[in-house]
Amino acid sequence: DAKTTQPNSMESNEEEPVHLPCNHSTISGTDYIHWYRQLPSQGPEYVIHGLTSNVNNRMASLAIAEDRKSSTLILHRATLRDAAVYYCIPGETSGSRLTFGEGTQLTVNP
Amino acid sequence: GAGVSQTPSNKVTEKGKYVELRCDPISGHTALYWYRQSLGQGPEFLIYFQGTGAADDSGLPNDRFFAVRPEGSVSTLKIQRTERGDSAVYLCASSINTNSYNEQFFGPGTRLTVL
């Protein structure tokens, strides 16, 4: 499994954009980059995934570096509900384990 | 629709006892995963079922841990001779497993405390 490095914690203000970085320099050529988040006292939930191109969905955007050794999850307007631990996970698209690191604890200030 | 459910939500047991944790996946999801999460850590993979069979059980820490999914739906994680170090939140997830992207849907977890 590819090793990931994420900041332990980040802080943002409500309504402002948040950029959550992840380094995954040992990612294999076929691995996707998945992002999950875990709200307090809940199980993780899927946020977004990508392979090479930048991706957008209703929750967030994912910017992937050209060499695929890093990626950035972008929350365009943080809300209080976005306070969670965000996990960056390189891996296959389906049928296999998710290897979680320690993630980034995002705090959103009102 | 109904998500992944896990019972019980909390389980307190004594060292040396046997426990069973149950997971009801989303209807129609053929893949089922068990993870456990210690305080302050990310979830750690335990076992993955595709249908009734365990496709990957490499994450089970030792032979005290066993999981079954006899009819390809509900799964039970069984822990024998519990130890204090088994205390954690046990998470279950399911996915549909088609040829397209298959996100994992997680349940709320069972908090196991071994005294």
Image (cartoon, coloured by chain):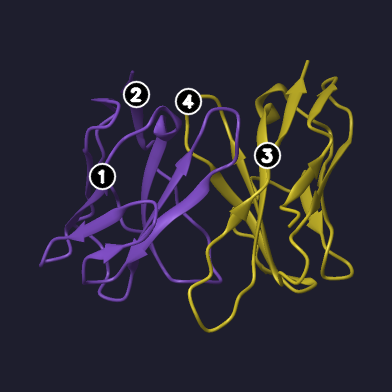
Chain colours: A purple, B yellow
- What amino acid is labelled 2 in the image? Thr
Q: Amino acid at mark 3?
A: Pro
Residue A106 in percent (x, y) is at 34, 29
Q: CA distance from mark 1 to mark 2?
A: 15 Å
Which SS class for mark 2?
Answer: strand
For the C terminus of chain B, the image quarter is top right
Q: Identify the residue at the far left of this view.
A: A66
Q: How far is disc 2 from disc 4 in space, using C-alphas? A: 16 Å
> Within the image, what quadrant is residue A14 found in?
top left
**Chain of the residue under label 2:** A
Badge 3 element: loop
* Residue for badge 1: A76
**Residue type highlighted by circle 4:** Gly
Of labels 3 and 2, the one closer to you: 2
Identity of the residue furthest to the front in this view: A15
In the image, is residue B109 above or below residue B13? below
Q: Residue at 39% x, 56% y: name it.
A: A58
Q: Earlier in the sequence, mark 1 or mark 2?
A: 1
Helix, strand or loop under label 4: loop
Residue B62 coordinates in the image, percent (x, y):
68, 46
What residue sits 80% from the left and 72% below the top? B52
Pointers 1 and 2 within a single chain: yes
* Left or right: A99 as drawn, with respect to A65: right
Q: Amino acid at mark 1?
A: His
Mark 1 neighbour class, 10 Å CA radius: few under 14, some 14 to 19, many 20 or more: some
Tell me the mark number nearer the camera, choosing from 4 and 3: 3
> Residue, x 48% and y 25% (percent of image)?
B40
- Mark 4 sits on what residue? B40
